[in-house]
Image: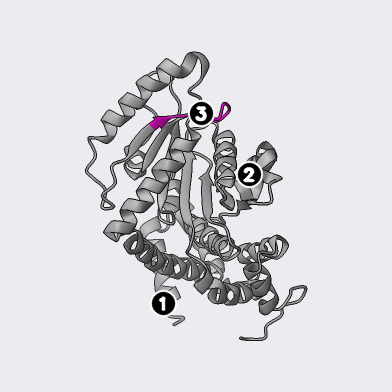
Amino acid sequence: MKNYKPKGRLTPAAYIKGVLNGDRVLLSRAITIVESNLESDKVLAKEIIQEILPYSGKSIRIGITGVPGVGKSTFIEAFGKHLVSKGKRVAILSIDPSSQRSKGSILGDKTRMEELANMQEAYIRPSASGDTLGGVANKTGETMLLCEANGYDVILIETVGVGQSETAVHGMTDFFLLLMLSGAGDELQGIKKGIMEMADMVVINKADGDNVRMSEMARLQYQNALHIFPLSESGWSPVVSTASAIKGIGIDNVWDEVENFKELVDENGYFVKNRNHQQIDWMYNNINEELKNLFYGSKEISSQLKVLEKDIVSAKISPVKAAQNILEEFKKTF
């Protein structure tokens, strides 16, 4: 193993040993290195990930998304506590593309999941996305591997809402869970068809009190809508159920369906096939990110871009021609 020790950091061996021994403090420190943009940390992160890779991949990875106000944090806490009661160790990774600027919405999740956060069997971590969706896939993916190597059986990856980041999360998980609400008019309005097509399960949350009947109606509507879509390559037919996270109703059924899904995809070979496909996608993701960093990290390119911006504004050159010119210049550097 390469003996590399950036300033203020431990050796790679120290992080690797700590992660593999279930040390939560060293897990957090290793994740910080993975999320860092320092060149020295990038080198260190690559070595750590390479060494822990054989000890990862043994968890079930679940993506969770939902419309604003659906109660994701309450649901995830109830779901996480149920999993702990089943003897599972659970890691929750929250993704917020705006977190690099605001911090608030992600860091608030940990305080809202206070009971789960205090459990030794649970680990909650905001997952920095970087500036692009590729950043989501790379950094969250590496964080996920570290959590698996640390001994977590279930990885829950939470997104802020229905948007572009859902595609990235779907591409790194085994099971995709969509949380919805009832009683908001036409139940199928306000959600993209693409998100519905990705869902392995739809849960109508807040199905309690006066909302039980409306939730059941919403369940039937979504179930009918899902039947329109072609069957997934996994062979799994998406299911719709109701739940009340605050009352703890229907949470056990969600895990039952995840286990049913896992049993099916293990038997038909889709689980391994999908994981292999995700690994290859991850490689191309990294290539794209490195190329982008190489391009925008060039001082010459940066100065030329400023000139081109002025030329575009003054109508001296079209945006298409400007892009072509700067890319031609970039090619000359190789």
Q: Does 243 lie within the magenta span? A: yes
- Real-space Cα distance between discs 3 and 1? 59 Å
The residue carrying mark 3 is 249
* Quadrant of the drawing holding the N terminus: bottom right
Q: Main secondary structure of the magenta part?
A: loop
Residue plotted at (46% across, 68% down): 286
Answer few, some or many: residues within 10 Å of disc 2's Cα (few below 14, many 20 plus, some between 14 and 19). Answer: many
- Residue 181 at x, y = what percent? 45, 26
3D distance between C-alphas at marks 1 and 2:
40 Å
Q: Quadrant of the C terminus?
A: bottom left
Residue 145's mark?
Answer: none
Of mark 3 and mark 2, the one earlier in the sequence is 2
104 above or below 325? above
Residue at numbered disc 2: 106
**Figure quadrant of residue 237:** top left
Q: Secondary structure at mark 3?
A: loop
Residue that sits furthest to the right in the current view: 8
Determine the residue located farthest toward the front in the rendered image: 86
Q: Position of residue 47 (x, y in %)?
A: 58, 77
Dot 1: element: helix
In the rendered view, would you say 301 is above or below 213? below
Q: Which mark is residue 331?
A: 1
